[in-house]
Amino acid sequence: MNNTPHTTPDTTTGLLDGKVAFITGGGRGIGAAAARLFVREGARVVLAARTEAQLKAVTEEIRAAGGTAEYVLCDLADGDSVRAAVERTVELYGRLDVAFNNGATTQPPGPLDELSEADFDRVSAVNLKGPWLSMKAEIAAIRATSGRGAIVNNSSVGSLAANPELPVYGAAKRAVNSLTASAAATYGREGIRVNAIAPGLTLTEMVDEWERESPGVIDRISMLNPLGRPADPDEIAQAAAWLLSDRASYVTGVILAVDGGLRA
């Protein structure tokens, strides 16, 4: 049990000042926004994803602005790849403090009986097995280095109710919510907090793909939202940053809807 006395966080510094952060899916969308934000809030980051060109572009942008960033290629469905990416973070910076498990893939929209078995396996491998593999590696790294820390998993508001357009995506994300709660209950005594965010519709490349396959979906979902619009990726990243920070020191096991009031 980690019984280190808690002290009131210093609110004069950045949310993640001095922390080492590992971010999956860091080459685009919410992951890239998180990387930029975490660095602005004082962190050193390692970005992980499969597409090197995207990772390199975000990393170079952060460095050009004076931040500290590295990247590593990582396949979230492969345990050896995930472990190597987390271990590389420790090699580069000497420790791991926080992690944002953001990487995901989507499914072709439509009823569950029309989804192929190959697509089911792909979505499950990345969106459920990926966060599980990531947490296993991250918890081991936090234990071995910082001793205490925080993890945020990126879920979806589509995990909180029926999701007829993206049923397997929603099911995988709902399972991530359960893993998050179980991890919070398991590792809290060690000083490792685990939470999730459940974003609503967010203007990312993934949603652009959904719009191409289902024209009008952005406007249709936005009309149901009390704020009347989709989110910008930075708005989602802000919630993750707070949950990872010491200012959320008494928050664990939460699935935080960041959805503009869609589920209000």
Image (cartoon, helix red, strand yellow):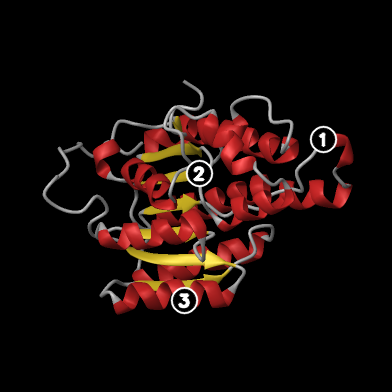
Please name whichever residue, 15 or 134, is drawn nearer the observer in this view of the structure. 15
Q: Position of residue 53 (x, y in %)?
A: 55, 77
Q: Position of residue 142 (x, y in %)?
A: 41, 53
Residue at image mark 3: 57
Q: Position of residue 54 (x, y in %)?
A: 53, 72
Q: Amino acid at mark 2?
A: Asn
The structure residue drawn at horizontal position 76% and vertical position 53%, both measured from the top left corner, is 122
Q: Please report whichever mark, 3 or 1, sits nearer to the chain's N-terminal start.
A: 3
Is 17 placed above or below 110 here?
below
Is 157 placed above or below 40 here?
above
Q: Secondary structure at mark 1?
A: loop
The structure residue drawn at horizontal position 60% and vertical position 72%, both measured from the top left corner, is 51
Cα distance between the residues tagged 1 and 2: 26 Å
Residue at image mark 2: 153
Q: Amino acid at mark 3?
A: Ala
Is residue 209 toward the left or the right of residue 15 in the image? Answer: right
Q: Position of residue 208 (x, y in %)?
A: 61, 54
